[in-house]
Amino acid sequence: MRPACYHASRIPFCHERHEGDLLKTYDVVILGAGHHALVLQAYLGKADLEVLSIDRRGVAGGALTTVENPRQPGFLHNTHSFFHRALTQMPWYRDLELERHGASYIEPALNVALVLRDGRTLEWWTDFERTRASFDAISPRDARTLESWRERFLPIVEEILVPESRRPPLPPADRARRLEGSADGRLLLETSASSPLAFVEREFEHPVVKAGLLFFNGLREVDLRARGFGHHIPALLASRGKAQMCRGGSAELARALVGAVREAGGELQLDTTPRRIRVEGGRAVGVETEAGDLVRARRAVVSSLNPQQTFLDLFGPDDLPSGWREHAAAFRYNLLAPLFALDVDLEAPPLYWAAESRPELRQAFMVILGLEDAGQFLEIVAHHERGTIPPTVMWGACPTLFDPSQAPPGKHTAFMWEKLPYRLGRDASTWDEERDAHARRMLDVWADYAPNLAHDVIDWTARSPLDTERAFPNMREGDLLVGAFSHDQVGYHRPFAGAGHYRGPLPGLYLCGSSSHPGGNITGLAGYNCAQVLLADLGLEAPWFASS
Ligand SMILES: Cc1cc2nc3c(=O)[nH]c(=O)nc-3n(C[C@H](O)[C@H](O)[C@H](O)COP(=O)(O)OP(=O)(O)OC[C@H]3O[C@@H](n4cnc5c(N)ncnc54)[C@H](O)[C@@H]3O)c2cc1C
């Protein structure tokens, strides 16, 4: 019989525990075995530390999930992450030799296509010249604007923003001082003072271009109206990092990470829920589990969970310095991050009628539907604030166009995601009544663009923002970024002031999940940055970080 944790990825991660097992003492114990935790664990192992990760699920990798439809054998779905942005450029992908451990990535050339109701498209290609040509067909002036901002922002992205995401953040005053010392830094500070919405409204003219750019940015879940969040603009206009997918499914990246962890001597304790972080003499010294076991940690306990889980659920009221629990309780989640997901099993890929005049669309990777002008953003925000469902704007892909191994021969899988509020109507539980009806409406909208979906769907499955939280309680309120990107929760202040350097308030306690800088998504960088801090604190050599 398959264990409850079985996922289609064929990863034999389940580790059976027997009552009365004597649990070892490790150098480091990590709570949660999502990708940030695994990245950290692999580096610590390479530094010769004995490390255990503990996870409540029966499979490691967190949201790197690939799940087989239990009703339709062979149809695989990447339920909690699919588009892995510039993943192969991540320093840990190289250092941990993940290709040797089996990871392999695909980066389709027509990377993103916004399909309009009238059949026109706005396209982002891996080749910027083709992106420019697509913008030019919609608005020659906007194409010129895009090109000129891209040239100005490229060095900012590559020499400031990318390196900043790959190391522990500086205190804001030190950062500002450093940026003021260069022309690029000053331009970044000036742009940052704006809001993404104000910048795009000021610089671009065509409603479709504005909508496309903002949705691209909106994918990052910031409040586009927020002043001081203009630092997203350079990445939006100039980033060379494109969406990629893992061959075989997202869980194959988890499998490769686990391979790297195991090779470095790391262990995983799955199907295990922590009950308490043990504190002795004011120091974090281990983890007690719900099963009543104690795992001791000689050097550190690291949490990849959210601040409420870490500081409220796992510590006694007297274990933490005063004020710390209040900070954790006040940590907030992104209003706009929750997703509704629709996965379909298909006889044929979605055939967009717009491809009749634009055949390239048949090989488009990320497809955006329902978006026509920038004003829809404010409408979507207002619906989220009210807890109602906005007119459908959705995006997704057909993975099997690029990787046939994710469905039986000749068949296909596809999915669409939509930003919808966590609290629907009276509260989140309303989703259990509304989920399937909403999925059918979404499928109808999709079929307006791809008419073959009216007869080629073999089966479908939907998941609401509430389902996300049930699967991953760290994604509280369905927030897939595990914490709002607001002024007091970013950079040196993520998750909150005083905790933004991956260290907790007690000796031996560290943080490594998406609630730390640079935040959520499959970047591995919170784990990577925590590894830098922890290894430095332990006085251990870490040659890998010199070149990042
Ligand atoms: C529908 C959806 C689609 C997404 N698509 C993408 C995408 O295409 N690209 C992208 O980059 N990102 C995507 N994301 C976001 C991405 O999945 C997350 O930001 C990322 O996985 C966070 O990584 P993490 O390691 O911090 O946490 P997770 O991957 O969530 O891992 C946390 C781990 O902690 C465990 N855990 C939780 N609570 C406890 C507990 N109490 N005790 C023990 N263990 C616990 C969990 O079981 C899990 O294994 C998506 C998210 C969702 C919901």
Image (spheres, rainbow, N blue to C red):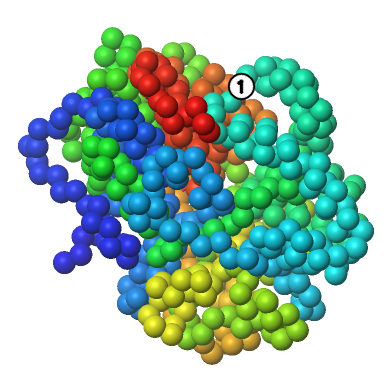
Q: Is residue 390 shown above or below 318?
A: below
The residue at the point 30 percent across, 52 percent down is 59
The residue at the point 51 percent across, 31 percent down is 547
Residue density around tag 1, few if under 14, some if 14–19, many if 20 or more, within 10 Å: some
* Residue 197: x %, y % from top left: 80, 47
- Residue 430 shown left or right of residue 297 in the figure: right
**Residue located farthest toward the left when viewing the structure as drawn:** 20
Q: Nearer the viewer, residue 179 or 497?
A: 179
Q: Where on the picture, by quarter, is residue 491?
A: top right
**Residue located farthest toward the top when viewing the structure as drawn:** 281
Q: Where on the picture, by quarter, is residue 487?
A: top right
Q: What residue type is labelled 1?
A: Leu
- Residue 412 shown left or right of residue 380 in the figure: left
- Work out which quarter of the rendered image holds the N terminus and state it: bottom left
Q: Is residue 412 shown above or below 315?
A: below
Q: Mark 1 points at which residue?
A: 170
Q: Nearer the viewer, residue 210 or 175?
A: 175
**Residue located farthest toward the bottom when viewing the structure as drawn:** 455
Tell me, yes or no, if residue 401 can be seen here.
yes
* Residue 124: x %, y % from top left: 71, 62
Q: What element carries label 1?
A: loop
- Residue 16 shown left or right of residue 11 in the figure: left
The residue at the point 28 percent across, 9 percent down is 281
* Residue 130: x %, y % from top left: 75, 65
